[in-house]
Every structure is written in C-alpha cells, then in structure tokens.
Image: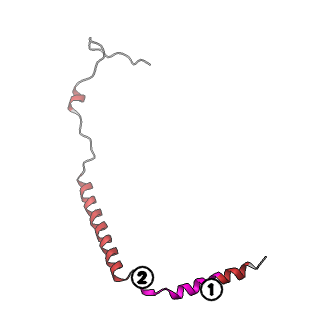
C-alpha cells in the first residue's frame, strides 16, 4: 500500500498551484461588497429601532370585559347554577 503522506503532499501541491492561478482581485468583494453590507446593516438597524418604537406603544394590560363581568351564565331557568358534572 502506498504511503498516505505522499499522496496527501501530492494533493497539496496540486491545490497550491491552483491557488496561485486565482486572481486575488476576483476573490475579494471590494468596495461594492462593503457598501452593500453597510447598507444592509443600516437597514436592519433602522428596522429594529422602528420595531422597538412600535412595541413600546403596545399596551399589554388586558381591559376587563364589561359583558362578562356584569352577568353570570346560568344553566337552569331558576337562575341557580348547576354543579359541575363529570
């Protein structure tokens, strides 16, 4: 069986030559990529600020229901509630 380190070093030499052939200017996002990223970051910041403002306006306290608090539901015509069955 051939030595595994020899095949690994052979693969690395092929990958190293491929890496040298790649133009470095084509790999980086450049100024346009930074501008797009910065615009997206500003948009997320503005959306979070707006959401925070809207969430502060929300009233989480539940108002009492006027109909349910004034009347009790009855099961029998005499006005008395029947015991729970079960």
Instruction: Say if the magenta span includes residue 26.
Output: yes
Q: 52 or 12, which is in the foreground?
A: 12
Mark 2 near mark 1, Cβ–Cβ under 8 Å? no
For residue 43, which quarter of the picture?
bottom left
Which residue is located at x 32 percent, y 75 percent? 36
Circle nearer the viewer, 2 or 1: 1
Which part of the image, by quadrant, shows the C terminus? top left
Residue 20, position as x, y percentages in the image: 53, 88
Which residue is located at x 28 percent, y 18 percent? 74
Q: CA distance from mark 2 to mark 1?
A: 23 Å
Which residue is located at x 66 percent, y 83 percent? 10
Name the mark on residue 65. Answer: none
Q: Which residues are magenta?
A: 11-28
Residue 3 in the image: above or below residue 62: below
Which type of secondary structure does the marked residue at label 2 adopt? loop
Is 73 on the left or on the right of 86, as rendered?
A: left
Residue 82 in the image: above or below residue 33: above
Residue 48, position as x, y percentages in the image: 30, 63
Residue 64, position as x, y percentages in the image: 24, 36
Which type of secondary structure does the marked residue at label 1 adopt? helix
Residue 16, position as x, y percentages in the image: 58, 86
Residue ID for mark 2: 28
Residue 84 in the image: above or below residue 12: above
Instruction: Say if the magenta span includes residue 32.
Output: no
Q: Residue furthest right?
A: 1
Residue ID for mark 1: 13
Which residue is located at x 26 percent, y 41 percent? 62
């Amino acid at each position: 069986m051939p030595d595994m380190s020899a095949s690994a070093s052979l693969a690395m030499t092929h990958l190293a030559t491929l890496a040298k052939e790649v133009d470095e200017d084509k790999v980086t996002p450049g100024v346009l990529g930074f501008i797009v990223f910065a615009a997206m970051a500003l948009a997320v910041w503005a959306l979070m600020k707006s959401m925070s403002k809207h969430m502060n306006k929300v009233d989480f306290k539940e108002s009492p229901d006027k109909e349910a608090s004034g009347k009790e539901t009855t099961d029998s015509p005499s006005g008395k509630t029947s015991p729970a069955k079960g």
